[in-house]
Amino acid sequence: MEIANKVFIVTGGASGLGAGTVRMLVDNGAKVVIADVQDEPGQALAKELGQRYVHCDVTQEADGKSAVAAAAELGTLFGLINCAGVAPAAKIVGKNGAHSLELFQKVVSINLIGSFNMMRLAAEAMSANTPEPTGERGVMINTASVAAFDGQIGQAAYAASKAGVAGMTLPIARDLSKTGIRCMTIAPGIFGTPMIFGMPQEVQDSLAASIPFPARLGRPEDYAKLVHSIITNDMLNGETIRLDGAIRMPP
Ligand code: NAD
């Protein structure tokens, strides 16, 4: 499976793991629609790489359709990489920073329902593709988190949303198997992106120290390499793969 000349949508493509994935895809000759809500960095990256940027809030069906329509102008959509996500921490009870119902719904809406919204729209477009000689019509890769299996204090909403992403991967892969569309999920550990750089330095250091090997924060390139492997290996389907340097965080 060649990446060159294939069309991809990367949600959350303006920053962090998504931006690293956009760079990898473009380096391999793909055409990419960067779909994000951060217009300025999204447009700047698109301009730098000669690609398309679309304002797309993944929770909105109309925005998802705009991203799919932008991809259709570049060719037939082959891949969706769902990187859009938010990770606000809040304890379940407490005077300060408690999980409000609204916050819980927002996190689930973006991380879980937003991923599903983009997949259903993308799968519809991909199912019209002429299949590859292997029968493949497309691939969709979601981003969960190790929090899906090992959630920490303050991560109730985040862990629930990411467990949902991991949970829907296999049934969606099975649903779509007859159309030749694969569905995979990556569950990253701790990656050096704006999501983590916003934390105090001592927290970042202790997170890096909890990664046995390679004893450093993950990099967007590490994530992008796994995306590349998944795209190019059609035996990978329906799985959630941890990408975490064997991290086991203390509770
Ligand atoms: P990031 O904050 O750098 O990037 C997230 C991107 O998602 C941003 O560009 C943001 O604008 C976009 N986004 C947020 N809400 C959106 C919405 N409603 N519609 C469209 N775009 C939206 O963070 P990152 O670390 O690159 O995170 C990428 C993904 O990886 C997220 O799903 C995150 O939960 C997951 N993840 C990150 C880590 C980590 O350690 N960085 C670990 C595990 C999982």
Image: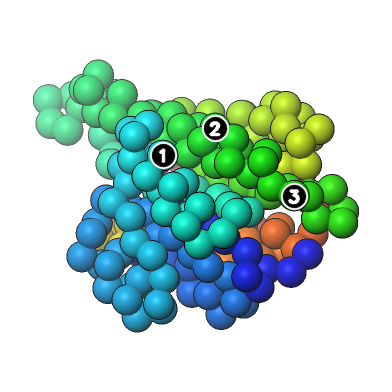
Q: Is mark 2 within 8 Å of ligand 1?
A: no
Query: Regarding mark 2 in the picture, which secondary structure is present there?
Result: helix
Which amino acid lies under the numbered mark 3 shown in the image of this protein? Thr
Q: Where is residue 83 in the image (x, y as percent from the top left)?
A: 46, 51
Q: Mark 2 or mark 3: which is in front?
A: 3
Q: Number of callouts in the render?
A: 3
Determine crowd level at label 2: few under 14, some 14-19, many 20+ residues with C-alpha closer than 10 A. some
Q: Is mark 1 on a helix, strand or loop?
A: helix
Contact between labelled residues 3 and 2, with CB atoms less than 8 Å apart:
no
Labelled disc at residue 130: 3
Mark 1 Cα-neighbour bin, 10 Å: few <14, some 14–19, many ≥20: some
Viewer can see residue 17: no
Q: Distance between the residues labelled 1 and 2?
A: 10 Å
* 44 vs 67, nearest the viewer: 67
Colour option used: rainbow
Pointer 3 and pointer 1: residues touching (CB < 8 Å)? no
- Amino acid identity at mark 1: Lys
Of mark 3 and mark 1, the one earlier in the sequence is: 1
- Asked if residue 45 is positioned above or below residue 241 in the image, the reply reads below
- Which residue is labeled 1 in the image? 65
Q: State whether residue 132 appears in this view.
A: yes
Residue at (72%, 32%) from the top-left corner? 176
Residue nearest the viewer, comparing 89 with 78: 78
Looking at the image, is 17 positioned above or below residue 153? below
Q: Distance between the residues labelled 3 and 1?
A: 21 Å
Judging by the rendered image, the residue that carries numbered circle 2 is 120
Badge 3 marks a residue whose secondary structure is loop
Front residue of 23/240: it is 23
Q: Residue at the spot x=24%, y=56% of the render?
A: 38
Q: Which amino acid does label 2 sit on?
A: Arg
Residue 61's image quarter? top left
